[in-house]
Each structure stands twice: as C-alpha cells, then as structure tokens.
Image (cartoon, grey):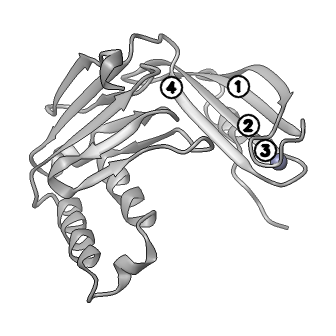
Amino acid sequence: MLVTFTMSDTSVIDGERLRMIAEDVVKCPICGEKSMSVKIFLYDMPYFGKVVLESGKCSRCGFKWSDVGLLETTRPKRIIVKVKGPKDLNALVIKAAPAIIKIPELGVEIFPGPAAPGYITTVEGVLQRVIDHAPSECLDESNPCYERIEVIRRAMDGNVTFTLIIEDPSGRSAVKGEGTEIIEEELSTAEE
Ligand SMILES: [Zn+2]
C-alpha cells in the first residue's frame, strides 16, 4: 500500500502548533465536479506567526492542490530578496498560490496558472522548482535554454548573486532569513 504524507500526519508530529479549522467539499478546478474535499489548518509557525495551510484532493479525478499563506493579509506586496551568498539560499519562503516569481539576473519569470499551488520552501528550493518545471528542451545541451539551467545550478551552490522577487496580489507571501537583506514594498494595482 502506498503511504502518502498528508497534512493530518503533521498534526500528530506537531500537535499544539497545528490545528484544523475548517473542512469542506468544493468544486474541483480540473474536472468541475463538486468532489474536492478541502481541509484548512492554522499553523503557528516559528519566525512567521500564524499561517494558513490548505490541502485539497478531488475524489473523482485525483487532482491534488495545496496552498499556504500568512493569516494576516496585507495589501498587494512585492518582496525583494538579495541573495549574495550560501546563507541567503537558506532563507525561508512562503509562496502563496497567486504570487509571481521573478529572478531578473537568471531570466526567470513564473506566472501561476489557475491551479498553481502555494508552498513553503527555501530560496534554494525555489531554484530547484524552477529547474524541475523547466521545459524538456532545456535538457538538450545544444539548446540555449540549457545554459540558463546551468546558471541556475551554479546559483544553487551560492556562487551567483541574484535577486528573488515575489509579487503577491494577495499579500500573503513572506520571506524570513537571518542576516538576509529582504525589502517589502507595496505593489500598486497598476503594476499587477
Ligand atoms: Zn476533479
């Protein structure tokens, strides 16, 4: 039998910090049936405070979705993270579902689709996701895209200075890192 990690397993590990606050069955964004069971958890997370975790699975088509974000929403915001060395790669990132990721120096711009998830990772984890989601032609050494992936790999070793920009119209994303230069500014609606 396949053992899958679910949010409720986390509550066993970290009982006091995590509790389920809502459960519902909603319409699935993929198959359109009202067969997607969603659970919403409140997580008291170190460094970030109260964080909302959402996890859903469709019993009809099997589509899985998850999202994460700060409980306290602010106005649309832009988070600018200056990555100058290996320690900055360990900064923690909460990326809410609607947030856009940009890394100008590495030519990265990721706009979320309607079923895109939110997640918690590190700056290094964001780079790994970029590589994991790169088009398959990027694996071909003769394709110009291959060189860009190599630059992202070097950045994962802490040898490239770059700027991670998260633009979040929901204002629920956040980044925390000890000693990392992080700037938060309001994202004006004209820019969205
Ligand atoms: Zn479905």
Label 1 lies in ligand 1 vicinity (Cβ under 8 Å): no
Of residues 147 and 192, which is closer to you in this image? 192
**Residue at x-position 76% and y-position 51%:** 63
Residue 57 marker = 3
Q: Amino acid at mark 2?
A: Ser
Of residues 179 and 56, which is closer to you in this image? 56
Dot 3 crowding, Cα within 10 Å, few <14, some 14–19, many 20+: some
Q: Mark 2 touching mark 3, by CB under 8 A?
A: no
Dot 2 crowding, Cα within 10 Å, few <14, some 14–19, many 20+: some
| Residue carrying label 4 | 69
Is disc 3 placed on a helix, strand or loop? strand
Residue 71 on image: x %, y %: 52, 15
If you read the primary sequence from the N terminus, does the residue marked by circle 1 or circle 4 appear first?
Answer: 1
If you read the primary sequence from the N terminus, does the residue marked by circle 2 or circle 1 appear first?
Answer: 2
| Residue carrying label 1 | 40
| Residue carrying label 2 | 8
Q: Amino acid at mark 3?
A: Lys
**Residue at x-position 29% and y-position 29%:** 176
Q: Mark 2 touching mark 1, by CB under 8 A?
A: no
Foreground label between 3 and 1: 3
Q: Amino acid at mark 4?
A: Gly
Residue 105 on image: x %, y %: 14, 52
If you read the primary sequence from the N terminus, does the residue marked by circle 4 or circle 3 appear first?
Answer: 3
Label 2 lies in ligand 1 vicinity (Cβ under 8 Å): no
